[in-house]
Image (tube, rainbow, N blue to C red):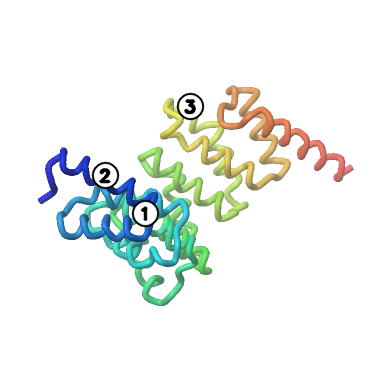
Amino acid sequence: MPPPLSQRAGLQQIFWVLWDRDRERARDVAHRVATDRADSSVARMALGRIVTRPRRTDRNFLLWASDHPTNPEFRCQAVRALEALGMDDPSWRERLEELSQDTDAHVRLRATMALVRRGNRNRLREIERDAVSAEDSRVRATAIQILGELDAAEYADLFRRALLLDRRWTTCSCCSPAPSATRALARLGTPEAMTTLLQDYLTAGGGFCQPRELAEFVRRLDASYTLSD
């Protein structure tokens, strides 16, 4: 049974103090509190820090998080961190196959991305499906972001539609696929991609690019036309 809120707040304060002094011990305490007291709040704090800069000594904690039965956020963050560490033994590949069938779309997408990076390019179609037809705009945004990170140039038209058309139906930028599409197009860097980004800025006010980024797009676009002459 989780501890009372007052006790939980005390644990969280102790965790931050301990993290600044002894990261490894703080992580182990967070794991112990989660398993012994059924309170994952401190483990969530530890995972949030670990995923930004994982270490090999975090491996066991992250494997535990990847198998968390009730919290998809733990599973998703664990996949990201373990992939950043270059985890690639047979047991982890088997776990990725399982996670690619997860009930949570974000976990499923992250695991499928990891499998694509291991050579399973046929799994790209699963990510494309969510990018195009997922009912939740946040899932579409994640799928588009992943396709962009995978340098999937064949999906340039999908990114273009997401930026120029999808923004019409999603008023909240945090839920819209448009920012992910912007980053994906900027990553591609082709003249067509740069033209789309400038078109979005001129017709819809942009909003997802800084002025210096737009200036760089113009420079790169001009350079591409100069080379083609």
Q: Helix or strand or loop: what does disc 1 sit on?
A: helix
Distance of label 2 from label 3 (alpha carbons): 41 Å
Q: Is residue 32 left or right of residue 107?
A: left
- Which of the two marks, 2 or 3, is nearer to us in this view? 2
Please report whichever mark, 1 or 2, sits nearer to the chain's N-terminal start: 2
Q: Helix or strand or loop: what does disc 3 sit on?
A: helix
Q: How many marks?
A: 3
Q: Helix or strand or loop: what does disc 2 sit on?
A: helix
The residue at the point 77 percent across, 38 percent down is 221
The amino acid type, in three-letter code, at marker 1 is Cys
The residue at the point 50 percent across, 63 percent down is 116
The percent coordinates of residue 144 (x first, y second) are 50, 46
- Which of the two marks, 1 or 2, is nearer to us in this view? 2
Distance of label 1 from label 2 (alpha carbons): 22 Å
Tell which of 182 and 65 is nearer to you. 65
The percent coordinates of residue 26 (x first, y second) are 32, 55
The residue at the point 43 percent across, 33 percent down is 174
Q: Is residue 150 left or right of residue 140?
A: right
Q: Which residue is mark 2?
A: 12
The amino acid type, in three-letter code, at marker 3 is Arg
- The tag on residue 76 is 1
How many neighbours does mark 3 have within 10 angstroms: few (below 14), some (14-19), or many (20 or more)?
Answer: few
- The tag on residue 168 is 3
How many neighbours does mark 1 have within 10 angstroms: few (below 14), some (14-19), or many (20 or more)?
Answer: many
Q: Is residue 175 above or below residue 40?
A: above
Q: Is residue 93 above or below residue 40?
A: below
